Image (cartoon, coloured by chain):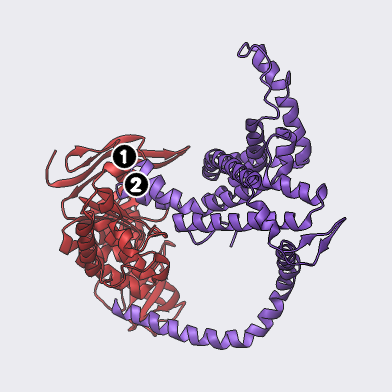
Chain colours: A purple, B red
Amino acid sequence: MMDEACENKAKCKEEKVKCCMRSRAKSRSNWMLLAPIYVFTILFVGLPILYMFLLSFLSRAKVWGVDFTFTLDNYKRILEPMYIDMLRESFQLAVLSTSIITLLGYPYGYFMARMNAVWKKRMMLLIMIPFWTSSLIRLYGWIIMFRSNGVLDKVLMGIGLTQKPLKLLYTYPAVVVGMVYALLPFMILSVYSSAEKMDWTLVEASRDLGASAFKAFWTVTFKLTLPGLLSGVVLTFIPSMGLFFIADILGGNKIVLVGSVIQEQLTKGRNLPFAAALSAVLMVLTSLMIRLYRKVTRTTELEGLV
Amino acid sequence: MNNNYILELKGVRKAFGDTEVLKGIDLKIAKGEFITLLGASGCGKTTTLRIIAGLETSDAGQIFLDGQDITSLEPNKRSVNTVFQSYALFPHMNVADNIGYGLKLKRMPKDLIAKKVQEMLQLVQLSGYEKRMPEQLSGGQRQRVAIARAVVNEPKVLLLDEPLGALDLKLRRQMQLELKRLQKQLGITFIYITHDQEEAINMSDRIAVMNHGVLEQVGTPNEIYYQPRTSYVAGFVGNANILRCGGEFYAIRTENILMNGEPECNREAVVLEKSFAGGQLRILFELPDAQQLTASRYGIDADVQVGSRVMIGWKKENAIPVAEE
């Protein structure tokens, strides 16, 4: 018994020494292999973000472009009530849509992982088919559903549930439905990939040790699929703050998201620095959110991310 | 219900689709007994265990635990715990939390849990490992955590599903002794599953040999070894030759085949093959009626030539009549 532990320790030490020697010799060739990824990341992720942060401290030129004078005005402007409200509203919408997505997506992903191969395929197909057409076209589909005297109204009035058109289009719920619809697959797939890897013997072990079916789910399955759930949250929360075209198409001009404002400042307002400042704030807020999530749930890994 | 029996299976049947896995299992297990279900893979031993644990439901039959009918009880309502073949340690909990899991579910106070976990760690000689995560342990250590996690709940019956299957031979031998010691110390009834006949003979008070969903024979290792009832048992436990004489079948252990001048040698045979298997010489003979026999001898007949004719035989009491399958 003790022998074994000792042996292992000795082995570990040996391995470590070997590893060190090997890694020193190999580190140069490894670096060469990884170089393209670094170059790619620096070029297409690092530099643009740096550029964005730099822009946010500059001021807007008279006609188009930027003046290279340092200023904090862009950030001060965000503190105006109008923009604070807009940020809060975007945040609320993102929280609401992400919650609904979680409630729908987690069970779907979980049950998909537990199904036999045939049903897995069918359920996967249900998620994949919508991706065969452009998301914009699918959104216009929702317009046909929601508009006054549209498909939904006709059905509801047809079966006598409502008497007159509901005027669902260009409302807050319409935007939420749009967000949930557009982002649900991301949640489902990341929960699924977590649940698919689950060793279900662990659930049996938990039941065997005295856990009820619910308790076993809560202490084992849920805990082990949490990385998938969290990466699903990240993948849906961030876009739902910024998917301006959903808010524009299904919400008319009534619901203004950070994404819409950034897009408007960029195109119509031609105010690159302010758009950059808004983006920077959005980025910092969301990364703070992710850190908080991780702290609260004590997960170090996110399924498929990091 | 006889109180001497802690567990009783009555006519337990199970089919998966069209395949009948258990064809009516009747088994009585005494309190504190170490009983082994022995059989080749696919014989139904794991299914039997899972039905006892409640992880699988039987199609027919009854299961009594300490006199109480538990046939349709949920697994968490049975005072039975399992050591899984894959150990099934919770990867997101450290060793102490793994072991304390069952006690926590019983809402035992925290300090008492901590005390019991310490006792268990001492029992399986893993003191100081409580903060380790399962992935940081060796196979043998995981094994011991899995045992501790089950035993700490003081189950009436402990089920062990090929718990040593993943370990190497040396560690296996060591753990066999360890488990036996643990079982004596705790006085818990062990139902142990293995396909390894040597392991079964080493550890068990009784062995139940299973074949195609049927219990072929239940008895002490001695009975199973020296008085096999069927040719399957004789062939599976130890190495026996099955010899047909008229309409009867006899099992003769390879080590009981005599040759070269010993008084019982009254049959002529041809040496077909010989091979060394770790200190033992194995010789394959063919009798005049084309039946083949294997003898295992200890080195002394090394000069036996392949193709030569020799006289072989066996003591009468070593030819055990068995039922053919």
Q: Which residue is drawn at 35% across and 38% down?
A: B58
Residue A218 x/y as whole percent? 40, 46
Q: What residue type is labelled 1?
A: Glu
Residue A39 x/y as whole percent? 74, 72
Label 2 Cα neighbours within 10 Å, binned few <14 / some 14-19 / many ≥20: many
Q: Circle 2 is placed at which residue position?
A: A207
Q: Are marks 2 and 1 in contact (CB under 8 Å)?
A: yes
Chain under numbered label 1: B
**Secondary element at tag 2:** helix
The answer to whether residue A27 is above or below residue A145 is below
Which quadrant of the figure has residue B313?
Answer: bottom left
Residue lying furthest left: B3
Q: Describe residue B195's horizontal placement relative to residue B124 as left or right.
A: right
Residue A184 x/y as whole percent? 62, 41
Q: Describe residue A37's horizontal placement relative to residue B140 as left or right.
A: right
The answer to whether residue B152 is above or below residue A10 is above
Look at the image and tell me in which quarter the C terminus of chain A lies: bottom right
Q: Which amino acid does label 2 sit on?
A: Arg
Q: Circle 1 is placed at which residue position?
A: B74
Residue B92 x/y as whole percent? 41, 59
